[in-house]
Amino acid sequence: MISSKILMTQKEAAEYLGTTVGTLNTWRHYGKDKIPFVRWGNRIRYRKEDLDAWIQTQIVQPNNQQ
């Protein structure tokens, strides 16, 4: 269960965000969207709280123009 883990694998993080591991790799490589990650040796891990914080930065408020 993901919620009981401190660090998520790339696959778990991608599933949580509704994207692919390849997309996460691209974002990390090119610095797109600046999602924090943990490098542990040659492994990449993500903290759920960092993913949740990133999601909050992606919220777009609708424009109230009519």
Image (cartoon, rainbow, N blue to C red):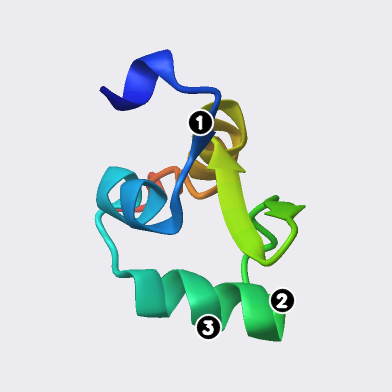
Amino acid, disc 2: Gly
Mark 3 touches mark 1? (CB < 8 Å): no
User: Helix, strand, or loop for circle 2?
Assistant: loop
Amino acid, disc 3: Thr
Question: In x, y percent, where is residue 1?
Answer: 26, 22
Residue 48 numbered tag: 1
Give neighbour class at mark 1: few <14, some 14-19, many 20+ (Cα, 10 Å): some
Question: In x, y percent, where is residue 57?
Answer: 59, 44
User: Helix, strand, or loop for circle 1?
Assistant: helix
Image vertical order of residue 61 relative to residue 37, above or below: above
Residue reaching furthest to the front: 41
Mark closest to the chain's N terminus, 2 or 1: 2
Mark closest to the chain's N terminus, 2 or 3: 3
Alpha carbons under labels 2 and 3: distance apart: 8 Å
Alpha carbons under labels 2 and 1: distance apart: 19 Å
Quadrant of residue 4 within the rendered picture: top left
Give neighbour class at mark 3: few <14, some 14-19, many 20+ (Cα, 10 Å): few
Q: Viewed as shown, does residue 31 lie left or right of 63?
A: right
Mark 2 touches mark 3? (CB < 8 Å): no
Tell me the residue that label 2 is attached to.
31
Tell me the residue that label 3 is attached to.
26
Mark 2 touches mark 1? (CB < 8 Å): no
Alpha carbons under labels 3 and 1: distance apart: 19 Å
Q: Residue at x 61, y 60 (%)?
A: 43
